Image (spheres, rainbow, N blue to C red):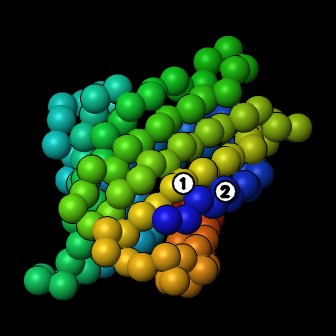
Amino acid sequence: MVTFQLERTAPLPIDEAWRRLTEWPRHADVVPLTRITVVTDPPTREGTRFVARTGIGPLSLADPMEVTAWHPPHDGEPGLCRLVKHGRVVLGWAELEVHPGPGGRTRVVWREELRLRGLPHLFDPLLDRTARAMFGRALNRLLRKA
């Protein structure tokens, strides 16, 4: 199990940063070999469920998630979305936060606890480095891509 936090400051209004982070199908545009299927009806709210499937054919991995907290930014207040992972292999949670920053910019915080069932703790340092790189690249692309 690893827990990590990524922070970025984006030259975006807070509502736009929130939209880019929480339109779930957009994540497939920035993570190679990934498809996102939203299982529940829009709009996103507590209870929304979706599945990120990464890989090709039988070598793909399903990462089903559920939104357990949904607090969009409002009237200058920060926004928070919490996801819980319910997969057979991928477990844990993620929190996405947006905060007003200086000059109309937005500070984004992505916090995650990630567990891969059956992976010995010996591999936690490798999982940590890999997750930070992969999620950091995805976060950068989500914030850059309109």
Q: Nearer the viewer, residue 105 or 137?
A: 137
Q: CA distance from mark 1 to mark 2?
A: 6 Å
| Residue at the spot 59% in from the left edge and 59% down from the top edge | 3
Query: Which of marks 2 and 1 precedes in the sequence?
Result: 2
Vertical placement of residue 79 versus 27, above or below: above
The one of 26 and 136 positioned closer to us in this rendering: 136
Position of residue 59 in the picture relative to residue 122 (left or right):
left
Q: Quadrant of residue 124?
A: bottom right
Residue 40 visible, this orientation: yes
Would you say residue 53 is visible in this rendering?
Answer: no
Which residue corresponds to the image point at 37% horizontal and 44% vertical from the top-left? 84
- The percent position of residue 33, horizontal first and vertical second, equals 30, 78
Q: Are marks 1 and 2 in contact (CB under 8 Å)?
A: yes
Q: Secondary structure at mark 2?
A: strand
State whether residue 33 is above or below residue 146.
below
At 53% from the left and 26% from the top, the residue drawn is 72
Position of residue 11 in the picture relative to residue 59 (left or right): right
In the rendered image, the residue lying farthest to the front is 121
Q: In x, y percent, where is residue 8?
A: 73, 55
Taking the image as shown, residue 120 lies to the left or right of residue 123, namely left
* In-front residue for pair 130/27: 130
Question: Pointer 1: residues within 10 angstroms few (<14), some, or many (20+)?
Answer: many
**Mark 2 belongs to which amino acid?**
Gln
Q: Residues within 10 Å of mark 2 (few under 14, many from 20)?
A: some
Q: Which residue is mark 2?
A: 5
Name the residue type under label 1.
Glu
**Location of mark 1 (residue):** 112
- For residue 4, the mark is none
Element at label 1: strand
Identify the residue shown where x is 56% and y is 32%. Answer: 80
